[in-house]
């Protein structure tokens, strides 16, 4: 059994490759600290990106939303005086309406996510990291702000001073997440932002301990290539926090449980530094623009952890 920890776009690319390369269904534990309420609806951006990608619905050119979606509802909301900086398409809104309806009827986020993933044909088991409320807040020189305000509305332009995961001290991983980690032969940490996508999962009670104690292999794919993040503000946040944007810095963040780090060929000079942490390295091409590239990286990861 394979479990992957993932955020949005970077994580979903590798998950798609894994879906094609594996003969069985895997499990993805997905960050929910980016969740937000817009127009009274519960929006789960990372979960939706993963489901849309695995279902073949994602708009890969934009990196978010559903391919070919329209925005008539958002346009009308704008005419009514609502803020429309968070772009929600019409079909996308249907997902958020359904999620909100089910949550208000008493279903858990885990249950609702399973329903959406199955009905859209994701083909994998998609688990929210928790059914409890955790929200990422970014402390900037302009003051604290919710993650979506920092990332979408303000374009991640503000300098990051610190990151807070509000509610994480009271949150618990769901029973399904704990079971997946306990029963997995391997865990793959996708090339998602280590601070915004992976750290909220790791902060949940007992998750790091489960990763340290598991009999199987824990592998991470670096989201930093040549000093840059291929998607999102990971490299900028590292620099803002006084860290070198590099695979070695990512390995240090996961050092207490990580067995293998996958890094791009351009970063081969970090092998000795990462190996000195007791972490094995795999050098390969990690940029995933085409489906063939996604599958090739997934296959290399599965070979490294002994699944194929």
Image: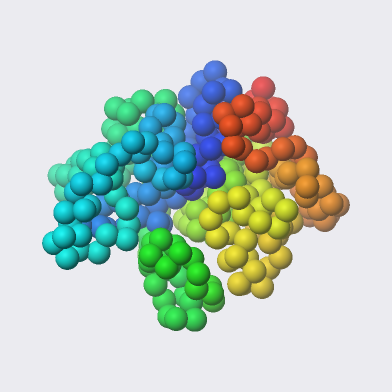
Q: Is residue 118 above or below residue 261?
A: above
Asked whether the viewer can see residue 158, the reply is yes
Measuring from the top left, give residue 218's x and y in whole percent. 65, 41
Identity of the residue drawn at 61% across and 27% down: 292
Measuring from the top left, give residue 301's x and y in whole percent. 67, 33
Q: How many marks?
A: 0
Measuring from the top left, give residue 146's x and y in whole percent. 38, 67
Q: Quadrant of residue 58?
A: top left
111 left or right of 195 in image = left
Q: Quadrant of residue 127?
A: top left
Which one is nearer the viewer's eye here, 150 or 5? Answer: 150
Identity of the residue drawn at 52% across and 34% down: 15
Which one is nearer the viewer's eye here, 167 or 301? Answer: 301
Q: Is residue 268 above or below residue 150?
A: above
Quarter placement of the C terminus: top right
96 left or right of 63 in image = left
Q: How is the image coloured?
A: rainbow
Asked whether the viewer can see residue 3, the reply is no
Which one is nearer the viewer's eye here, 66 or 271? Answer: 66
Quarter placement of the N terminus: top right
Which one is nearer the viewer's eye here, 202 or 32? Answer: 32
Identity of the residue drawn at 58% across and 32% down: 290
Identity of the residue drawn at 55% across and 51% down: 231
80 left or right of 70 in image = left
Measuring from the top left, give residue 186's x and y in whole percent. 61, 34
């Amino acid at each position: 059994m394979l479990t992957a920890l993932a955020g949005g776009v970077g994580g979903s690319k590798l998950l798609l490759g894994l879906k094609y390369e594996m003969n069985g269904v895997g499990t993805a534990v997905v960050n929910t600290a980016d969740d937000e309420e817009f127009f009274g609806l519960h929006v789960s951006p990372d979960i939706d990106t993963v489901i849309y990608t695995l279902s073949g619905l994602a708009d890969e050119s934009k990196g978010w939303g559903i391919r070919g979606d329209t925005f008539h509802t958002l346009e009308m909301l704008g005419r009514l005086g609502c803020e429309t900086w968070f772009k929600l398409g019409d079909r996308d809104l249907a997902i958020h309406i359904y999620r909100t309806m089910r949550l208000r009827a008493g279903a858990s986020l885990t249950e609702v996510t399973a329903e959406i993933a199955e009905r859209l044909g994701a083909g994998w088991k998609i688990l929210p990291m928790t059914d409890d409320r955790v929200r990422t807040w970014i402390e900037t020189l302009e003051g604290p702000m919710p993650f979506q305000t920092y990332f979408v509305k303000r374009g991640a332009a503000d300098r990051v001073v610190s990151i807070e995961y509000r509610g994480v001290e009271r949150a618990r991983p769901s029973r399904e997440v704990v079971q997946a980690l306990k029963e997995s032969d391997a865990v793959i940490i996708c090339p998602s932002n280590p601070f915004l996508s992976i750290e909220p999962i790791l902060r949940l009670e007992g998750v790091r301990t489960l990763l340290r104690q598991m009999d199987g292999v824990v592998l991470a794919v670096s989201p930093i290539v040549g000093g840059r993040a291929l998607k999102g503000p990971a490299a900028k946040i590292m620099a803002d926090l006084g860290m070198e944007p590099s695979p070695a810095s990512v390995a240090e963040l996961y050092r207490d449980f990580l067995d293998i780090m996958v890094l791009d060929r351009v970063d081969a000079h970090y092998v000795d530094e990462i190996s000195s942490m007791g972490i094995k390295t795999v050098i390969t091409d990690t940029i995933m623009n085409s489906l063939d590239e996604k599958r090739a990286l997934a296959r290399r990861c599965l070979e490294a952890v002994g699944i194929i």
